[in-house]
Image (spheres, rainbow, N blue to C red):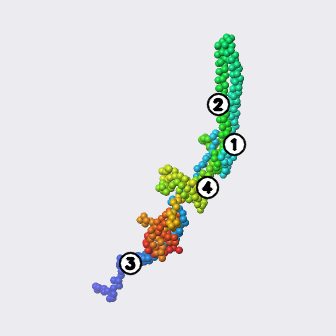
Amino acid sequence: MATPTRPSGPDLGALRIAEGQRRAGRTGRRLALLATALLLVFLTAAAAFLLLSHRAPLVDVAVAQEAAPGRAALLNASGYVTPRRRATIASKVTGRVTGIFVDEGMHVRQGEVLATLDESDAKRALESTATARDATRATIDDNQVQLKNAEVALRRIHVLEAGGAATPEALDNARTAVDSLKAKIELARRSVIAADARVREARQAVDNCVIRAPFEGIVISKDAQVGEMVSPVSAGSGFTRTGIATIVDMSSLEIEVDVNEAYIARVVPDQPVKAALDAYPDWSIPAKVRAVIPTADRQKATVKVRISFLKLDARILPDMGVKVTFLGEEPQLKNGAAAPVVLIPQGAVRDEDGRKVAFLVKDGHVERRAVTLGGTRGADAEVVAGVAAGDTVVVKGPSRLRDGQAIAVKE
């Protein structure tokens, strides 16, 4: 049998690509594309970093201002306006209110009647004690008449006894009668004195039904109404009041603040203070330290300081919030003039290794300058050396500014 022969010509089957080789080629192309993309991202980031590192940082600046002459601020604190004399007026006796003659905001004088209580029972007691006193006083007159008669009888019996017409017993009885009447008269006199004391007590009870102002001031609250019961002590019920009204002596207003005990050494009596009420923040009120209370609050770690107003004003009211600034000594004089002090924002002062520095702007570059600080005035810091009035300082900028570094000022 004859063997079939293959047709002559090229073998196209040899050009076929195996399935495994086709997948490997696709994976290689993908890896090459990914590597190229990552390389492009890296080059772009490097170029941006180089561009930004050579770009001048943007900063906020401010111009140093010459400070007006005055005392340096040593310490700031907050507190409240409080009166030294403030009293809730109560009655001395328990009774029903029959009249209220004050209202909130009224000015009252010392001794002025604020309210009255029902005095009917007190008046009846006064009448009873007065009548008893008068009755006791009447017995004195009766006993004095009887004493005169007993003394006459004593003299008569004494004569008769001397002539033998009367017995010694009759003489003794006459003397006893005289002495007894004298003792009764003395007892009655002392009873009258005791009755007078009871009358005065009863009259005081009547007076206690009238409540008067103990000092001159302003009524800030009315705590009772006509018809209510009031008592000097709490009765354990909401139907019995313990006060009639609350009065404040407006001439005794002062400021009370709590100062952190870490800074209390900066506060001394008679130290000048500037106060500003929260209701009138632009009104600077002169004041001075009246007293530093010699005890600390262990819970808050503060010491209480009382401050007196140098001049009171009708706008100052009790319990108003107030901010105070404790002032230092007068600035030292130089050649007859106050030492120059400039003000810069507190944000312009930086702390580098315990030294205070500021960065001045000179011809588009920054110059590092050591500064000597005074006190503070609001949001500004007092600089006594290192910065002159008119200098431009960096307020906000990168934390790692370098001396001589180029900067760009924000518009």
Q: CA distance from mark 4 to mark 1?
A: 37 Å
**Upstream in sequence: badge 3 or badge 1:** 3
**Residue kind at label 2, given as amino acid type:** Ala
**Upstream in sequence: badge 4 or badge 3:** 3
Q: Residues within 10 Å of mark 1 (few under 14, many from 20)?
A: some
User: What residue is pinned by disc 2?
Assistant: 194
Residue 98's disc is 1
**Residue kind at label 1, given as amino acid type:** Thr
**Residue kind at label 4, given as amino acid type:** Leu
Looking at the image, residue 385 lies above or below residue 103: below
**Residue kind at label 3, given as amino acid type:** Ala
**Upstream in sequence: badge 2 or badge 3:** 3
Q: Which of 258/52 is in front?
A: 258
User: What residue is pinned by disc 3?
Assistant: 32
Q: Nearer the viewer, mark 3 or mark 1?
A: 1
**Upstream in sequence: badge 2 or badge 4:** 2
Q: Under tag 3, what secondary structure?
A: helix
